[in-house]
C-alpha cells in the first residue's frame, strides 16, 4: 500500500497548476488545468487526482492569487471561492497550508537553477541579500524573500495594487485617461493580462491612433510578429512602466540579491523584453542609478516555480493545522 501523498497547487486567475511531491520533496506529475473549466478549487483538485488514479492525500499546500487571511475568501481575478474547512474535509487532509501565490513564488527564488532564469542587463547578486519578484499574469503579483538565521522568509502583501506613477509626460497623459475612468489606478490595472487591453486603448488615444479591441493574447502575438505597430508600441510602454515599478521594488526591499520577473506574459516576449526599456527604466532612479545598475534582473523561465515554493513552505510549516 502506497504512503499518503502530498499535493501542491498554484491557482491563479486563469490556470491552476497541480503536482504531487516525489520522495525528495519536489513537485512531480504536474498538470495545468483551466480555472474556467471547474466550479471551484475542490472540483479541480478532484479532477487532477482522478487523472492519477485517486491517490490518498496526507497534506497539501495551495498557493492562491489573492489575500489569504480568513477561512473563506475569493480569488481576486476569478470567481472561485475558497473554504479552508471544505477543502480539508473534502480531500481528507491532515494538514492544509494556504498561502498567497506570490509568497510561494518568492520562496522558490533561492532554489531556482540557472536554467530556470534568464538575466536581463548587468549586475551581480549579493549572497544572502533580499530578493524581489513581480509578475504580470492575469493580475500583478509582488513579493520578496529575506534571509534570517539560516532560513528564507517570504513577504506576503498586495503590492500589485499600489498606485502607478508616470515617469514622463506621455505616461502622465496615459494615466490621466485611466484616472478619469477608474479613480485609483493601481499597477495591476495596466501592467497585467487583465489590464493590457485597457493600456492598449489608452496608448492609442494618447498617440492619436485607432485601436481595435484586442484580447491580451492577441496583443502579445501581434507585438511578437511585428505586424502591428500599435501592439508593439503598447508592449514597449508596458515593459518600460514595469521597469520603473521593478526599480521601485528593488529600492524598497534593498533587493541586492536580484529582482525576478515571473508571470505568464513576460517569458512569452523573449528578445522583445530583453531589448525593451525595462532595464534602462529599472536603473533610472537619479542619484541611485548606480545602486540599481549593480542589481541583476532575471526573467523566470520555469512554468511552475510557485509549486516549488509551496513545497518549501509546507516543509517549513511543521505546525500547520
Image (cartoon, rainbow, N blue to C red):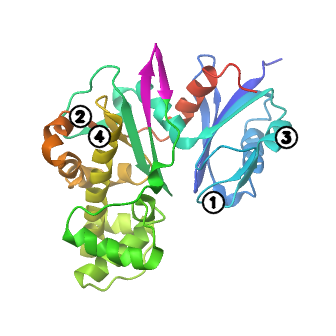
Depth check, mark 4 against mark 1: the one in front is 4
Q: Name the residue under label 1.
A: 78
Q: Name the residue under label 3.
A: 90
- Labels 1 and 3 touching (C-beta < 8 A): no
Q: Residue at 54% across / 35% down in the picture?
A: 104
Mark sitting earlier along the chain (1/3): 1
Judged left or right of residue 304, residue 17 is right
Depth check, mark 4 against mark 2: the one in front is 4
Tag 3, which secondary structure? helix
Magenta stretch: give its range: 144-153
Q: Name the residue under label 4.
A: 251
Mark 3, other Cα within 10 Å: few <14 / some 14–19 / many ≥20: few
Mark 1, other Cα within 10 Å: few <14 / some 14–19 / many ≥20: some
Q: Mark 1 to mark 3: distance in Å?
A: 21 Å
Q: Residue at 30% across / 73% down in the picture?
A: 174
Depth check, mark 3 against mark 4: the one in front is 4
Amino acid at each position: 500500500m502506497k504512503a499518503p501523498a502530498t499535493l501542491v497547487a498554484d491557482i491563479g486567475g486563469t490556470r491552476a497548476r497541480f503536482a504531487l511531491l516525489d520522495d525528495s520533496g519536489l513537485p512531480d506529475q504536474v498538470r495545468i488545468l483551466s480555472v474556467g473549466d471547474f466550479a471551484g478549487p475542490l472540483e479541480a483538485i478532484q479532477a487532477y487526482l482522478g487523472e492519477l488514479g485517486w491517490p490518498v492525500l496526507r497534506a497539501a499546500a495551495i498557493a492562491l492569487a489573492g489575500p489569504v487571511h480568513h477561512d473563506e475568501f475569493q480569488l481576486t481575478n476569478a470567481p472561485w471561492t475558497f473554504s479552508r474547512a471544505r477543502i480539508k474535509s473534502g480531500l481528507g487532509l491532515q494538514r492544509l497550508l494556504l498561502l498567497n501565490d506570490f509568497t510561494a513564488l518568492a520562496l522558490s527564488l533561492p532554489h531556482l537553477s540557472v536554467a530556470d532564469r534568464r538575466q536581463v542587463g548587468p549586475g551581480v547578486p549579493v549572497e544572502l541579500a533580499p530578493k524581489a519578484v513581480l509578475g504580470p499574469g492575469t493580475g500583478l503579483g509582488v513579493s520578496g524573500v529575506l534571509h534570517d538565521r539560516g532560513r528564507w522568509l517570504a513577504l506576503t502583501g498586495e503590492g500589485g495594487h499600489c498606485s502607478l506613477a508616470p515617469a514622463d509626460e506621455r505616461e502622465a497623459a496615459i494615466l490621466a485617461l485611466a484616472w478619469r475612468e477608474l479613480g485609483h489606478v493601481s499597477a495591476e490595472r495596466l501592467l497585467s493580462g487583465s489590464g493590457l487591453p485597457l493600456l492598449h486603448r489608452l496608448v492609442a488615444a494618447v498617440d492619436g491612433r485607432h485601436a481595435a479591441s484586442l484580447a491580451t493574447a492577441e496583443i502579445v502575438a501581434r507585438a511578437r510578429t511585428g505586424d502591428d505597430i500599435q501592439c508593439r508600441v503598447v508592449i514597449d510602454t508596458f515593459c518600460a512602466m514595469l521597469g520603473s515599478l521593478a526599480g521601485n521594488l528593488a529600492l524598497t526591499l534593498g533587493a541586492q540579491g536580484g529582482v525576478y520577473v515571473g508571470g505568464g506574459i513576460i517569458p512569452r516576449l523573449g528578445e522583445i523584453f530583453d531589448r525593451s526599456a525595462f532595464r534602462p527604466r529599472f536603473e533610472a532612479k537619479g542619484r541611485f542609478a548606480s545602486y540599481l545598475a549593480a542589481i541583476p534582473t532575471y526573467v523566470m523561465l520555469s512554468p511552475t516555480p510557485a509549486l516549488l515554493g509551496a513545497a518549501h513552505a509546507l516543509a517549513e510549516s511543521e505546525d500547520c493545522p
